[in-house]
Image (cartoon, grey):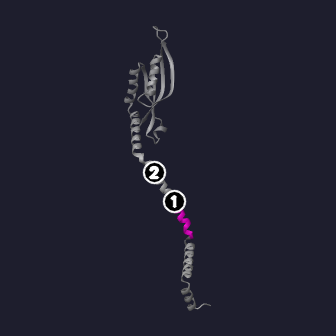
Amino acid sequence: MISNEQLIGFIKSQPVGVGCAVLTILLGAGIYLRNDKVSDSEALLDQKITQGERIDANLKNGVELPEQLAALASSRQQVEARLIRADELAKNKQYFYKLESETGVKLVEISQNAIPNAVQGAKTIYLPIGFSVAVRGDYPHLIDFLQRLEKGQRYCRVISANLSLLSMTSKDRGAAELTLNLSLELLGQR
């Protein structure tokens, strides 16, 4: 057994070696005690790296957000300017009367259909508003009417069309008066 005096003498004769040994023991104990925290720290580091990359991507992509928001707002205004309102019957029919005067066809019948219950209960801003329209005229005028519906002021979808011969004119045997019955929808809002 080593006495205290021999131990102190050994430490005084080998101060560097003893210091390194103590330091090695302390570092080994520290590594052993902190070893379980390394995996937790790595997981936290990965989480912080992912969060930092997401923030960096948001900053890069967010540079043009004000311009994109302005473009979306402008587009929304343009879309809403082309919509009709379901409860404005007279104004909705006026659209078809205007087409009648522009194209030279005779508007025989126009009626706005009721909004189906399935569409009424839907959680949407926009809804299709159905119309039944019958117009009379010669073929070029009816085609002009259809083209103006297609490219017109309102968003239009023709559901069905039925073209029938009404009569042949006596002046010109080549011209025929036709009747066009349309079932169509205009995009609208409540």
Q: Residue furthest front?
A: 13
Instruction: Check disc 1 and give the amino acid type.
Output: Gln
Which quadrant would residue 85 be assigned to in this image? top left
Q: Is residue 190 above or below residue 30?
A: above
Tell me if residue 41 is in the magenta stretch: yes
Count the labels in the image: 2
**Magenta span:** 35-44
The x and y percentages for residue 11 are 55, 86
Q: Are marks 1 and 2 in contact (CB under 8 Å)?
A: no
- Numbered tag placed on residue 47 in the rendering: 1
Q: Is residue 131 above or below residue 44?
A: above
Q: Quadrant of the N terminus?
A: bottom right
Identify the main secondary structure in magenta. helix
Residue 146 or residue 166, whichever sits in front: 146
**Horizontal and vertical percent for residue 94?**
38, 27
Of 50 and 161, which appears nearest the observer?
50
Residue carrying label 2:
58
